């Protein structure tokens, strides 16, 4: 039961960080939109529309980036908050850019 108690204490400490995280989240929404626009530009510059392979590649990149984001979120929950936060933000930005590129590619048919 000792480990359970320690986990409970850590969880409570996380409460304040979560509130701060939500504020951060608001800021990051704007960043996400910029990233999506960048992804769109990236898709166009990569000229994804001319081949299905490129579309698949973009979709695969988006999936991999989302996977990385999920991993970073897990790390953050496990408490390596500082560097996990930075890694997560980067992973989210990459995922959003990749997804936007994949979507733009799909629409470009």
Image (cartoon, grey):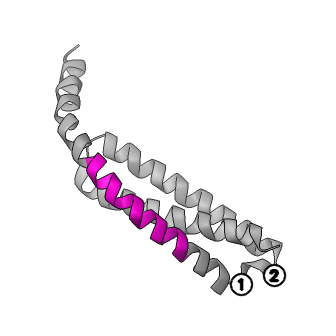
Tell me if 95 is positioned left or right of 59 in this view: left
> Mark 1 packing: few (<14 Cα in 10 Å), some, or many (20+)?
some
Question: In which image quadrant can residue 89 be found?
Answer: bottom left
Q: Position of residue 22 (x, y in %)?
A: 30, 46
Q: Is residue 92 visible?
A: yes
The residue carrying mark 1 is 47
Q: Nearer the viewer, residue 37 or 6?
A: 37
Q: Is residue 84 visible?
A: no
Q: Is residue 95 above or below residue 44?
A: above
Please tell me whether residue 24 belongs to the stretch shown in magenta: yes
> Marks 2 and 1: in contact by CB < 8 Å?
yes
Question: In which image quadrant can residue 31 be found?
Answer: bottom left
The residue carrying mark 2 is 50
Q: Position of residue 76 (x, y in %)?
A: 32, 46
The dominant secondary structure in magenta is helix
Tell me if 68 is positioned left or right of 22 in this view: right
Report, in whole angstroms, how far the alpha carbon at label 1 lies from the one at label 2. Answer: 6 Å
Q: Nearer the viewer, residue 11 or 26?
A: 26
Rendered-image quadrant of the N terminus: top left
SS at badge 1:
loop
Q: Which residues are magenta?
A: 21-38
């Amino acid at each position: 039961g000792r480990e359970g108690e320690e986990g409970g204490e850590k969880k409570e400490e996380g409460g304040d960080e979560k509130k701060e995280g939500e504020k951060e989240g608001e800021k990051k929404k704007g960043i996400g939109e910029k990233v999506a626009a960048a992804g769109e530009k990236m898709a166009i510059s990569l000229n994804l529309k001319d081949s299905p392979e490129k579309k698949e590649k973009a979709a695969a990149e988006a999936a991999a980036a989302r996977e990385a984001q999920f991993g970073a979120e897990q790390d953050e929950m496990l408490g390596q908050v500082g560097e996990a936060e930075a890694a997560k933000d980067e992973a989210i930005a990459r995922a959003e850019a990749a997804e936007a590129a994949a979507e733009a590619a799909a629409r470009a048919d």
